[in-house]
Amino acid sequence: MIPSQVDETLPELAPFVHAVQGRRPEDGTWCEAWTVRDVLIHQTGNAEELARVLEAFLAGSPVETRGFEREAPYRRLSDSELWAAFMNRCAQLTEITAAAARDLPPDTEVMWTGRSVRVPFFAEHMREELILHRWDLTGDDLTAVQALDEPWMTEHSVVSVGRPLLVKGHAGLDLEPGGRFEGRLRTPGTDDVVVSADADGGGIRLAAPEGPATIESDAAVRVLLLWGRRPADPSRWHSAAGPETLRRLRTLLSGY
């Protein structure tokens, strides 16, 4: 049973838990290199690191964000030990985000993976991770589509995460000096998500719709594309941009 405070802070935890418990640890996922166990290891590391960085800031001794090496200790645990660690780390993150909300103004800036974020980011980012990686387990079921469709998911991906989503893809574009690429992902009735790349790196922003879209889709598909994923039903997205432009856009949006 999930404690009420944890459930209130991370409402996406219960659907994620049910998805994990409905599968075997060695089952495959939509994240091609990961099994269900790998997804759970990743999520445990996410919860731990979000809590560690925010707790250190609260204590007046900020720390650097660690990379995926934080997951290594969890790979040595048994399945039951891993499950207990995951639930414990989510509870710890809930406690620390509650303390931060109580003791810090919400616009307080904290460093996370080389960029400045605000205090509400820490709980919100774990919520996004729970939604996205639940999709890795279930694919396009109703719960996943409804969660991905929420406007805050697009805003968090673009504004709060932003350029780190494009680092891997930018390297894959191998742009010539002076070369530039720009693509527009459009969901009718909302701002476009504009992604770009040049010799200096990648850029991502929200902008009013202008000109033709590179890809038009529902909001849930657009979030999946931003994170280097694809919906099970490809007819949910549409494009008249041509294969070369689509190839370059897909390369830029390769995910982590």
Image (cartoon, rainbow, N blue to C red):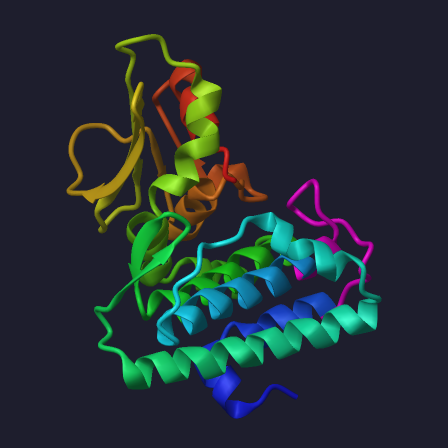
Left or right of 13, for residue 100: left
Q: Is residue 57 above or below residue 129?
A: below
Left or right of 81, for residue 143: left
Residue at the extreme front of the image, as rendered: 61
Q: Is residue 33 above or below residue 152?
A: above
Is residue 30 part of the magenta span, yes or no?
A: yes
Residue in view at x 80 percent, y 64 percent: 77
Residue in view at x 38 percent, y 18 percent: 245
User: Where, by quadrant of the figure, is residue 195 drawn?
Assistant: top left
Where residue 16 appears, as percent x and y from the top left, is 61, 68
Residue at the extreme bottom of the image, as rendered: 4
* Front in this rendered view, residue 11 or 190: 11
Which stretch is magenta? 21-40
Number of numbered discs visible in the structure rendering: 0
Magenta-highlighted stretch: main secondary structure? loop
* Front in this rendered view, residue 217 or 132: 132
